[in-house]
Amino acid sequence: GAVVSQHPSRVICKSGTSVKIECRSLDFQATTMFWYRQFPKQSLMLMATSNEGSKATYEQGVEKDKFLINHASLTLSTLTVTSAHPEDSSFYICSALPGEGYYSNQPQHFGDGTRLSIL
Amino acid sequence: LAKTTQPISMDSYEGQEVNITCSHNNIATNDYITWYQQFPSQGPRFIIQGYKTKVTNEVASLFIPADRKSSTLSLPRVSLSDTAVYYCLVGDWWGNQGGKLIFGQGTELSVKP
């Protein structure tokens, strides 16, 4: 149980393109999902918290107009990298916190990440 | 959110028990301790979670002393496939931080034949 599916697993596109990444909780509902970014040989960096039905909360230094997050249902959150440039190339990972309400005593479950390469 | 400190790397041999200790001096009353494993180009995988004392599951044990300022992940009889980065995280699951997790540098475990 507790499977999080992230799609696509890899994207290669030209500079200026917008890219959408989907994160789905397959066998549980998640009011809250998170988006992380990871550069090679580095740890995960939290980008934003996505709450179903409300605006995402972005961490300091993360451009909300560059990284659009939509959490329209209890099982799906999307991250759109708008007008992507080479410096946006990275490994993007989502996670979902089980629970239908705001509070949860269960651990986050992570997707397998999306490797984004901007040429 | 409590900051965590772990050794950057550890080496072990197949069949040995590995203990990775994490320091979290500023842990709060509501905080749980969770450990994740990450292989290259994959998302972190949940290993174990605890609040105090000892927790054991089919893959690991987690030891938490009474003051909860540290925790130790114990992996029994490691194999080559346990080579990965291990993250210790402290998170408030009861809503004050919305379940937010801040990853530290993790411990890169290398298991040799």
Image: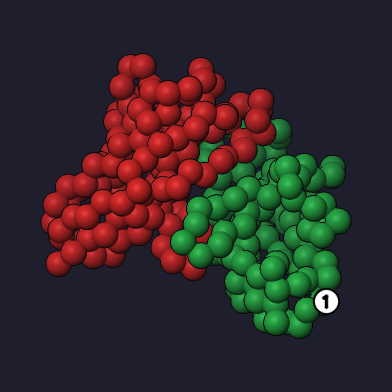
Residue found 28% across the figure and 64% down from its top: B81
For label 1, the residue is A16
Q: Give the position of the N terminus of chain B as an image quadrant.
A: top right
Asked if one can make out residue A75 in the rendered structure from this viewpoint, the answer is yes
> How many marks can you see?
1
Q: On screen, B12 above or below B27? A: below
Residue B57 placement (x, y as % from top left): 32, 42
Chain letter for the green part: A
Dot 1, crowdedness within 10 Å: few (<14), some or many (≥20)? some
Asked if one can make out residue A96 in the rendered structure from this viewpoint, the answer is no
Q: Which corner quadrant of the image does residue B50 belong to?
A: top left
Give the amino acid type for the residue marked by disc 1 in the picture. Gly
Q: Give the position of the C terminus of chain B as an image quadrant.
A: bottom left
Which hue is chain B drawn in? red
Residue found 50% across the figure and 53% down from its top: A43
The colour scheme applied to this rendered structure is: by chain
SS at circle 1 = loop
Q: Which corner quadrant of the image does residue A115 belong to?
A: bottom right
| Tag 1 subunit | A
In-image side of A112 versus B15 (left or right): right
Name the one closer to the observer, A58 or A4.
A58
Q: On screen, A111 above or below B50? A: below
Name the one closer to the observer, A50 or B20.
B20
Residue A97 placement (x, y as % from top left): 61, 44
Residue B15 placement (x, y as % from top left): 13, 56
Q: On screen, A28 above or below B34? A: below
Q: On screen, B54 above or below A74? A: above
Residue found 68% across the figure and 50% down from its top: A47
Residue found 37% across the figure and 31% down from its top: B23
Residue A7 placement (x, y as % from top left): 66, 70
